[in-house]
Amino acid sequence: MGYWILIGGIALVSWLVSNQLKQKFKKYSQVHLRNGMSGKEIAEKMLADNGITDVEVISVKGQLTDHYNPANKTVNLSESVYAQRNAAAAAVAAHECGHAVQHAQAYSALKMRSALVPVVSVTSGMSQWLVIGGLILGAAAGAGFGYYIAIAGLVFMGFATLFSFITLPVEYDASNRALAWLKGKNMLTPEEYKGSEDALKWAARTYLVAAIGALASLLYWAMQVFGGRD
């Protein structure tokens, strides 16, 4: 019961932050750029201003599906961001280019996160089941086999938690790079900049909630495994 209360609470906070983020992007999508540039054009200019010539800006389907892919060096912008000419589109486009700049400059936190991607992709889906299976086999009572299975699950869960926390400086740094460039190059009016800044702050909070949720889940299961032991 305690676990479901924890998960429910985290899910509620996550939903509230995500909903607020969507409302912010909807609001700032109505703040049209005076310079008339689209998200694609914003992205291409930021890349060029940072001396990056080997990254392509492309359009992908979906909403809030924007991301930078270091494997093929592409800035992937959702259809609305790619074509639209507003403060929200400018914020997202510049943020994703912030990741491209991180990649070009070998930003340490990004390198760490990239190194963890293959590990987390394998371990995250099975971590909780290993812990539960270990508990069923008697981990909390100190039974050897079940205990070691549960420990393996906690280690796997720890990788996912570490990944979530390493993501925080990566995302915050990308936003800071984006905002510094938008302001330094006078790409936006004060009103437009304020909207872009607010949108990126709410986007960053979604990663913060995810990290807190991952840590809370890890601590909960760790207590289940170790709490029943003498």
Image (cartoon, rainbow, N blue to C red):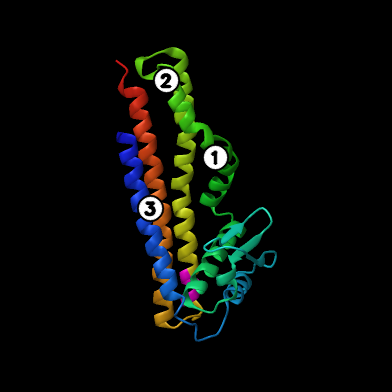
Label 1 secondary element: helix
Question: Which residue is painted at 61% across and 76% down in the image?
Answer: 41
Q: Nearer the viewer, residue 117 or 104?
A: 117
Which amino acid lies under the numbered mark 1 shown in the image of this protein?
Answer: Val
Instruction: Please give the range of residues in magenta.
Output: 179-183
Between 76 and 168, the residue placed more toward the observer is: 76
Amino acid found under the numbered disc labelled 3? Ser
* Most frequent secondary structure within the magenta stretch: helix
- Which of discs 3 and 1 lies nearer the camera? The answer is 3
Residue named by callout 1:
120
- Is residue 155 in view? no
Percent position of residue 58, x then y: 66, 67
Q: Secondary structure at mark 2?
A: helix
Q: Nearer the viewer, mark 2 or mark 1?
A: 2
- Residue 136 — which label? 2
Q: Residue at x 38, y 53 (%)?
A: 14
Of the two numbered discs 3 and 1 on the same chain, state the one appearing first in sequence. 3
